[in-house]
Amino acid sequence: MIRRHPLAEQAAEELLRRIGDGEWTLGAKLPGETTLAAQLSVGRSTIREAIRELAGRRVLESRQGAGVFVIALQAAEDWDTVLRKADISDVLEGRVAIETEAARLAALRRTPADLKNFRYTLADRQRASEKSPDDWYVEADLAFHRAIVTAAHNAVLTELFDTFVPRIRRAMLDMLKLDDQHRHRFDQAAHEAIAEAIRAKDPDEAAARSRDQLAAVRSALT
């Protein structure tokens, strides 16, 4: 892959190194572009690009009329990196945070179309749990859980879940390999209980059933 701004990337890494070494502390204001350009022997445009890169990595913040300030001492890892490094326990805890709130909101906002989607995805999950290979079963299970999140009608929760799906999928496949009794395949009743609470417009019950289902998965794993 061709790197469009190699000098800017090198300048960003040098600025990040100097921040890490304590040259600029948290909250400190960086020198101006001209000074930084001279120190790093690059052009001002390169410095501007480097600052934009570090702003995107949530290390620097440009404040109009005030300058550029240090808001973190190291770059935050991007979401994909965080998900790749997360273990199964982290994934399950993340699902609890997203899916229990989604279930609660779904109980308040679900539509007839959402209820129809629950019926379809639950039926597909039941069929897949009986004979299908693990990857087919996982897709059917995820389809039901996504139906719950979608029924919350919250764009942020839906986006969080969708970006989380590849890591959830890998975690589920790993869990199924560890679950020699196939308990995860036989928890259809727990999933139906979530859907029923949402259908009944009971947000507390929906959240509790969602939390209990994921807690049972974690308990089976440990």
Image (cartoon, helix red, strand yellow):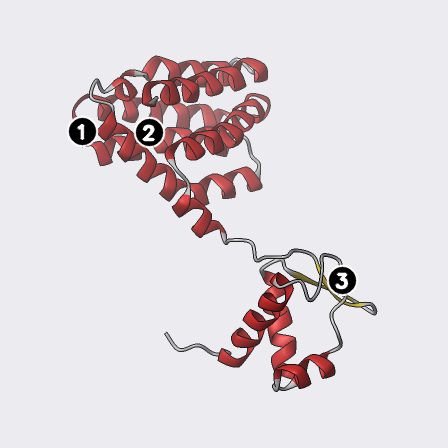
Q: Secondary structure at mark 1?
A: loop
Residue receiving disc 2:
141
Residue under label 3: 28
Q: Dot 2: what SS?
A: helix
Q: Earlier in the sequence, mark 1 or mark 3?
A: 3
Q: Quadrant of residue 201?
A: top right
Q: CA distance from mark 2 to mark 3?
A: 49 Å
- Ranked by sequence position, the earlier of labels 2 and 3 is 3
From the viewer's perspective, is the residue at label 1 or at label 3 nearer?
A: 3
Pointer 1: residues within 10 angstroms few (<14), some, or many (20+)? few
Residue 166 location, quadrant:
top left
- Graded by Cα atoms within 10 Å as few (under 14), some (14 to 19) or many (20 or more), the crowding at tag 3 reads some
Q: What residue is at 73 percent from the left and 82 percent from the top?
A: 35
- Quick one: SS at disc 3? loop
Residues at badges 2 and 1 in contact (C-beta under 8 Å)? no
Three-letter code, disc 1: Ser
82 or 143, nearer to the observer: 82
Q: How many marks?
A: 3
Is 132 in front, or is 179?
179
Residue situated in front as seen by the camera: 69 or 19: 19
Name the residue located 30 percent from the left edge and 31 percent from the top edge. 140
Q: In the displayed structure, does residue 20 sit left or right of residue 143?
A: right
Label 2 crowd (10 A; few <14 / some 14-19 / many >=20): many
Place of residue 174 in the rendered image (x, y in percent of width and height, measured from the top left): 27, 34
In the image, residue 193 sits, relative to residue 131, either above or below, namely above
- In the image, residue 150 sits, relative to residue 57, either above or below, namely above
Label for residue 132?
1
Q: Could you say where residue 135 lies in the image, as x and y percent from the top left?
A: 23, 36
Q: Amino acid at mark 2?
A: Asp
